[in-house]
Amino acid sequence: MSDNTAEYGNLDERVAAALARDVAPEVRAFAERLAHASGALAVLFYGSNLRTGSLDGVLDFYVLLPGSQAERIWPRVSYHEWDCRGMVLRAKVATMALETFRAAAAGERVDTTIWARFVQPSALAWQRDRVAAAAVASAVAGAARTAARLAVALGPAEGTAEDYWRALFRATYAAEFRVEKAGREDSILAANREHFAGLLPLALRAGGIAFAQADGGVLRPELDRRARGRALAWWSRRRRLGKPYNVVRLLKASTTFHGAARYAAWKIERHTGVPVVLTPWRERHPVLAAPGVLWQVWRGRKARERETGSRPA
């Protein structure tokens, strides 16, 4: 599907079409399973597996619930494994209220991760009904408006859409408590060119930001000094709080990440080749078990090195 302004008259149409993209039947079945277990309104699928279509690795889902947000620090993160017709599917699942998701996407919360993530590709893998689907599409459109407003405030006086998206992602990655390789923003744009093609003009129009567009796709947003100042002040607060907020979120996840031990065991074996014995105690106390697991992995790798070294070349 080629997403551009010629095909879609407004941002809402564009977002709804993008969310309706095809995903593997196994992904939809997993999403439905998660939805029924939690009483969800909708389930979004995103991440690298959405782009590649692969079922390998860990699938990424956002489960969106009705009602008010249960936790003050959200989302709630969990790990799930499901045997789907003889294939073990693995998923990391973030769960939160749809209303909180909408507010965060609209930039009404200090959190930056929702709008920065969902201006990127996602798919509506399951929805309870048309009303829920429309509410999710509206929230994701809000993420695009929030991201576009900041992109033109951070970017140059004029430039291509990629110049503005690049400025946005460079800033948001720097504000989060994680290490990304230099040029991560370029890899996002390169991997998702079709998704971002034509998105910025639609998001600017939807956000009430006028712009001029010259040949070659060069944009000149008509953002006056006062409007730019408001946008940058809005971002300054979120940038300052970004790392502390992410630290709090990680600390919460270390004690509330359901299935954390199974997720860690799978990751360790995948990256080291050393299987981790997951006892009931280790599953109940993943943080306390970590030193013993690391010792087991170290011994396993040393044993493998000795075994490999003893073999004739």
Image (cartoon, rainbow, N blue to C red):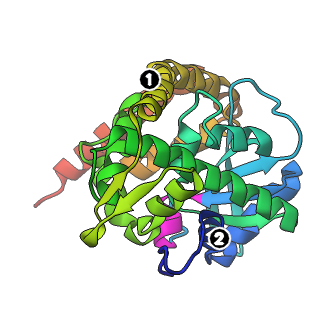
- Where in the figure is residue 244, as x and y percent of width and height? 50, 18
* Residue in view at x 67 percent, y 58 percent: 44
Q: What element does badge 1 sit on? A: helix
Total marks in image: 2
Q: Amino acid at mark 1?
A: Ser
Residue pointed to by mark 1: 236
137 shown above or below 150: below
Magenta stretch, overall SS: helix
153 shown above or below 9: above
Residue 151: image quadrant is top left
Which region is colored magenta? 46-53
Local packing at callout 2 (Cα closer than 10 Å; few below 14, some 14-19, many 20+) is: some
Q: Are marks 2 and 1 in contact (CB under 8 Å)?
A: no
State left or right for residue 261 relative to residue 239: right
| 2 or 1: tag closer to the N-terminus | 2
Q: Which mark is residue 13?
A: 2
